[in-house]
Amino acid sequence: MKNFSDLGLCAELVRAVTEKGYDTPSPIQAEAIPAVLERRDVIAAAQTGTGKTAGFTLPMIQILSDMDGDKPRRMRPVRALILTPTRELAAQVQDNIRTYGVHTRLKSAVVFGGVKINPQIRQLRDGVDILVATPGRLLDLCQQKACRLDEVHMLVLDEADRMLDMGFINDIRKVIKLLPKRRQNLLFSATFSKEIRSMTRELLVNPITVEVSPENTTAETVKQSAYRCDAGAKAALSIELIKGGNWDQVLVFTRTKHGANRLSKKLDQSGIQSSAIHGDKSQGARTRALQGFKDGKIRVLVATDIAARGLDIAQLPHVINYEIPNIPEDYVHRIGRTGRAGKEGEAVSLVCNEERPFFSAIEKLISQRIKLSDLEGFEPELWPNRAPTASEVQKAAAQRKAAAQKARGPRRPQASNNKKRDNRGSENAAGKSSNQSGGQSGGKSSGASGNRRRRPFRRKSR
Ligand code: AMP
C-alpha cells in the first residue's frame, strides 16, 4: 500500500499528516493527490468522510508552496480558492489547511456570511494564499474591492452538488468570471445529477475522474434500517431508540427549522440533553452547539439538512432520519455523517405513511433495500396496503398549507431584508424549496441565485 510520500508529497506535508495521526492515504487521497500534483483538472465522486478534504488541500499546499511562497505575504495574491456551500464546511476546510500547512509559510483565510465583514477585509489585506469561501460573502468582498481573484491558479468546488441544491449556481458563475481563464479546476461531489454533469462539462478541461465508490452510494460501514410509524409518534419513538439503545451521540435530521426546535425541546423534556442547529441560529450558537456535541456535553444534535452539511464529527455512531427527505440524494448526505473514515455507524429512518414514496425513491437511488420493520408499541395505525404516490402526498401537503394560511389570515408585510446576502452560506439564503408538507420557513433567497432547481419527483411508490 502506498504511503503519503509515495504520492509525491513533500517532507513538510508528510510530517504534518503523520503528526495528525494518518498512516496511510485513503483511497480518494491515493487517486486524487497525484492527479492534482500533475496539475490536471479533477472530478471526484467522493462522499464526506472519505478524506476528500486532504485529497485536494495537501497537493494544493504543495503546489502553492513551490510557487513564489518566498515572497512577503502582503505581496502574495489569493492563488487558490475553495468554494463551499456552508459556513461550517468552510471553517472545517480551513481548519484542515491550517493543520496540513503547519510546516509551510502559506496563509489561509475563511470568509462566510452571517458574521462581520470588516475583520475579513483586514485579513485579506494582510495577504492570503488560500481562500475558503461561501459564494455570497465572497462576491460581497469582491464588490467592495477587498478581494481580488485574478491570480487564482486553482479553483475547488467542494460539495458541488449541495452548492447547486442551495441555489448558488449564479453566484458561482459570477465568481468564475472574476478568475483567470487558465487555472486548475477540481470538483468534488457526493452525488452526480444532470446539473452537476453539465457544470463539469462547462468548467473543467479534460478532467481526470476519480471515483472511490460508485456514484450515489452509501458507505458500507453504515448499517441502515427503518421503522414504520405514525407521524405523531416519531418523537416518542426517537426517545425510545436513544434511551433504549443507550445511544450517547446522535445526529437527528428534521426537515424544518421549527421541527428541529420542537423535537429538541421534547428531547430535553424527556431528559435527553440536545441542541438544535439550523439557519435561524446565529453562527455563535451553531458553533457552540457543535462544540458541545463534539465534547459529549450534548447527547443529541437536531439539525436540518443544510445546517448539518459538511459537519465532520469523528466517529459519529448514530443518525436518525426523523423525517424522510423528498430529495433522495439528501439521504446519502445525511447518512454520510456516520460511518466516516472507515468507522462503523448506524442510520435509522422513521417512515410514516406519507413518506413511503420518498423512502422508495431512496432505495432506488442507492440500489439497496433498507430493512423496514416495526418497533413494539409504535406500530403505525395508518399504513394502507397501497402506498400514496408522491404527487398525492404533495397535493395533500399543498392543501394543508393553503388551509393553514387561510386560517392564519393575510400575511403581514415583511420588513426589507438587508442581511440576505450576508446570510448566504446558511440555509436562510438557500432557497430551499418546500417539500411534501411545507418547506423550511425563512428559506427565501434574493434574486436568481435562490432559484433552486431540483429534479421533480415522479417515481411511483411501492
Ligand atoms: P473528509 O472526508 O475530508 O471530511 O474527512 C473525514 C475524516 O477523515 C476527517 O476527520 C479527517 O481528519 C479524517 N482523515 C482524512 N484522511 C485520513 C487518513 N489518511 N487517515 C485517517 N483519517 C483521515
Image (cartoon, rainbow, N blue to C red):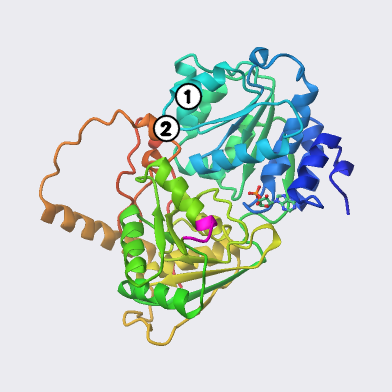
Helix, strand or loop at disc 2?
loop
Q: Is residue 428 above or below residue 247?
A: above
Residue type, mark 2 in image: Val
Residue 173, disc = none
Helix, strand or loop at disc 1?
helix
Question: Is residue 296 in the magenta section?
Answer: yes
Q: Is residue 401 visible?
A: yes
Is 324 positioned to the left or the right of 123 in the image?
left
Q: CA distance from mark 2 to mark 1?
A: 9 Å
Crowding near the residue tagged with mark 1, few <14, some 14–19, many ≥20 C-alpha atoms within 10 Å: few
User: Looking at the image, how many numbered discs can be counted on the residues?
Assistant: 2
Tags 2 and 1 in contact by the CB under 8 Å rule?
Answer: yes
Q: Label 2, on which residue?
A: 115
Quarter containing the N terminus: bottom right
Query: In this orientation, which residue lies closer to the viewer: 414 or 202?
Result: 414
Is 338 positioned to the left or the right of 270 in the image?
right
Q: Is residue 260 above or below residue 283?
A: below
Q: What are the residue bounds of the magenta stretch?
A: 293-297
Residue at image coords 73%, 32%: 60
Q: Quadrant of residue 90?
A: top right
Residue 94, position as x, y percentages in the image? 61, 36
Q: Is residue 34 above or below residue 367?
A: above
Residue type, mark 1 in image: Pro
Q: Label 1, on which residue?
A: 119
Kindly report the secondary structure that dominates the magenta region of the rendered protein. loop
Residue 73, position as x, y percentages in the image? 67, 17
Residue at image coords 62%, 61%: 315
Q: Is residue 40 visible?
A: no
Query: In this orientation, which residue lies closer to the viewer: 99 or 356?
Result: 99
